[in-house]
Image (tube, rainbow, N blue to C red):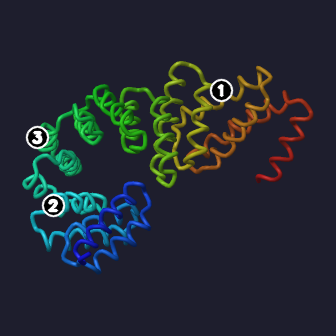
């Protein structure tokens, strides 16, 4: 068996292991094949494909080097241009990504995902019309989740939130791990005033990417919006619960004084109903809030409320509150 034949044999075995997600074995086989036949572009292409499965910066840089080597040997390698373009997108290097993706579809117009990626780049750069031109070259019937996502973003940017939600739903149906689809669906729902549904979608995004702090901050913000809606409806208790949920996530959020009054009203109502546990929780929140400089002028009112409600507390709850105050002051 010649070195070239053995290299192809190893390549086929490596592809098999790659498709079965045995990446370490695929790397071993491809590295061995490259030693046997260092001028075979497919070896560098597949070695680059394996590298892209580890999304750290170092691996992405390795992948670019490997795809570049494949293109050095075979400049018209459309798939190598496409894969390198995808890596540039992941790195946020959009100029280089566009060059590769445009070359890929020039060499092979049937690489549909390249059009969707180009549309995403145009969206990021604020070129909705150009993005739509790329999307028109992709058949929605092919079920490309990136097509639906990009179309959803175009509709979102145009303020057509209900239509955008329909597209994001299609994305999620195709790919339940598409984090940004949940995020943009959430913001679309929020723009329609559907804050509870927005929060549920952001919670799904948090499960997938728990380290992304902005999703938590948006959840807190939407809890505040729910609180304001309930306050307008006259439900001070429910409004206060939403305000507290928001503050528990992001204590830097600021409530207008009128909503401090809503929490005061809810506190009194809960004590009047004998719901001491929830009433004390709101009272504790009020005491924390009026420690902030912008609410100092409301401190006296909260102290007055505290004296009133403490008179209504059963002895056990009074003692518990007294002890808690000692340890929290």
Indicate which label's residue lies in the foreground, 1 or 2. Answer: 2
**Residue occupying image coordinates x 71% and y 23%:** 269
Q: Quadrant of the N terminus?
A: bottom left
At 37% from the left and 72% from the top, the residue drawn is: 58
How far from the left and from the top, in percent, is residue 18? 37, 59
Task: Give the image quarter of residue 91.
Answer: bottom left
Give the number of the mark in front: 1 or 3: 3
SS class of the residue under badge 1?
helix
Left or right: 324 in relation to 222? right
- C-alpha span from label 1 to label 2: 61 Å
Question: Who is closer to the viewer here, 78 or 22?
Answer: 22
Asked if the residue under mark 3 is in contact with the one under mark 1, i.e. CB atoms within 8 Å, the reply is: no
What label does residue 159 carry, if any? Answer: none
Between residues 322 and 75, which one lies in front from this camera angle? Answer: 75
Task: Say which label, 2 or 3, has the lower sequence index.
Answer: 2
Vertical comparison of 158 with 54: above or below: above
Foreground mark, 2 or 3, reads: 2
Closest to the observer, 230 or 7: 7
Report the residue marked by disc 1.
Answer: 265
For disc 3, the marked residue is 133
**Residue 38, position as x, y percentages in the image:** 23, 78
The correct choice, above or below, for 208 with respect to 23 in the image is above
Q: For the residue carrying disc 1, how many other residues have a C-alpha within 10 Å: few (<14), some (14-19), or many (20+)?
A: some
Position in image of residue 148 (x %, y %): 27, 36
Residue 299 placement, left or right of 36: right
**Marks 1/3: CA–CA distance:** 55 Å
Q: What residue occupies the far left of the structure in this picture?
A: 106
Q: Residues within 10 Å of mark 2 (few under 14, many from 20)?
A: many
């Amino acid at each position: 068996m010649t070195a070239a034949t053995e290299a192809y044999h190893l390549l086929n075995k490596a592809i098999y292991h790659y498709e079965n997600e045995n990446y370490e074995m695929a790397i071993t086989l491809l590295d061995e094949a490259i030693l046997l036949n260092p001028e075979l572009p497919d070896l560098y292409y597949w070695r680059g494909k394996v590298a892209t499965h580890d999304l750290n910066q170092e691996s992405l840089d390795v992948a670019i080097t490997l795809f570049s080597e494949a293109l050095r040997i075979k400049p018209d390698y459309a798939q190598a241009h496409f894969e390198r373009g995808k890596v540039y997108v992941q790195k946020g290097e959009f100029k280089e990504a566009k060059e590769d993706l445009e070359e890929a579809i020039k060499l092979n117009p049937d690489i549909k995902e390249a059009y969707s990626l180009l549309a995403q780049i145009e969206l990021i750069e604020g070129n909705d019309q150009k993005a739509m031109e790329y999307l028109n070259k992709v058949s929605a019937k092919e079920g490309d989740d990136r097509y639906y996502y990009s179309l959803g973003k175009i509709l979102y940017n145009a303020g057509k939130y209900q239509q955008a939600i329909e597209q994001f739903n299609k994305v999620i149906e195709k790919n339940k791990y598409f984090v940004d689809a949940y995020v943009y669906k959430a913001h679309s729902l929020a723009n329609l005033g559907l804050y509870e549904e927005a929060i549920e979608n952001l919670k799904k995004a948090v499960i997938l990417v728990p380290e992304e702090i902005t999703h938590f901050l948006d959840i807190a913000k939407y809890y505040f919006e729910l609180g304001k809606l309930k306050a307008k409806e006259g439900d001070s208790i429910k409004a206060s619960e939403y305000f507290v949920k928001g503050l528990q996530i992001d204590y830097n959020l600021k409530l207008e004084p009128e909503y401090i009054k809503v929490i005061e009203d809810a506190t009194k109502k809960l004590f009047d109903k004998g719901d001491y546990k929830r009433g004390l929780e709101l009272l504790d929140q009020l005491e924390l809030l009026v420690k902030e400089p912008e609410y100092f002028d409301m401190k006296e009112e909260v102290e007055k409320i505290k004296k009133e409600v403490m008179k209504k507390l059963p002895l056990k709850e009074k003692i518990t509150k007294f002890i808690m105050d000692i340890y929290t002051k």
